Image (cartoon, helix red, strand yellow):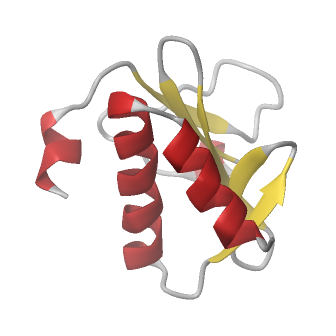
Amino acid sequence: MNASEKIDQYIEKTRGWKGETIEKLRKIVHEVEPKITEEWKWNSPILSYNGMVCGIGAFKTHVKINFLMGAHLKDNTAFLRVDWTPKTHAQLILKKVTRLMRRC
C-alpha cells in the first residue's frame, strides 16, 4: 500500500468532523502547491515538497497541522502556535469545523 492509500485509510478510520477536516486540509495543501507529495511517517500523513512541509493528525479533542518550518511563516492572524520545541515548527490546532473549513 502506498502512502496516499494509507492516508486515505487513515481518513476513513478517523470519523466525524476530524476526518472531514483532515481531508479538507489535505485538499487545501494540494491546491496551494500541486507538486506536494504524500508520505506516511510515524503513523501519520506527511506532505512534502523538497522536504517535509507539514504533518496532519487527529487527536482526542482536535486536529493538528504541524508546519515543520512554520516559525518562518508570516502569520497576521495569530492562529499558528510556535511556543513549543523545536522552535522552527508551528502548529494550527482545530477543535471544531470552522467557517473557513466549510467553504472548501
Indicate whether 17 appears above or below 75.
above
> Horizontal and vertical percent for residue 9?
62, 54
Q: Residue furthest right?
A: 42
Camera-nearest residue between 39 and 19: 19
> Horizontal and vertical percent for residue 89?
71, 39
Camera-nearest residue between 23 and 37: 23
Residue 78 seen anywhere in this rendered image of the structure: no
Q: Residue at x 29, y 35 (%)?
A: 77
Indicate whether 88 appears above or below 86.
below
Quarter occupied by residue 2 = bottom right
Q: Is residue 29 left or right of residue 84?
A: left
Residue 103 seen anywhere in this rendered image of the structure: yes
Q: Is residue 98 left or right of residue 54?
A: left
Camera-nearest residue between 61 and 34: 61
Q: Quadrant of the N terminus?
A: bottom right
Indicate whether 70 appears above or below 7.
above
> Horizontal and vertical percent for residue 14?
52, 35
Q: Residue furthest top?
A: 61
Q: Residue at x 82, y 43 (%)?
A: 43
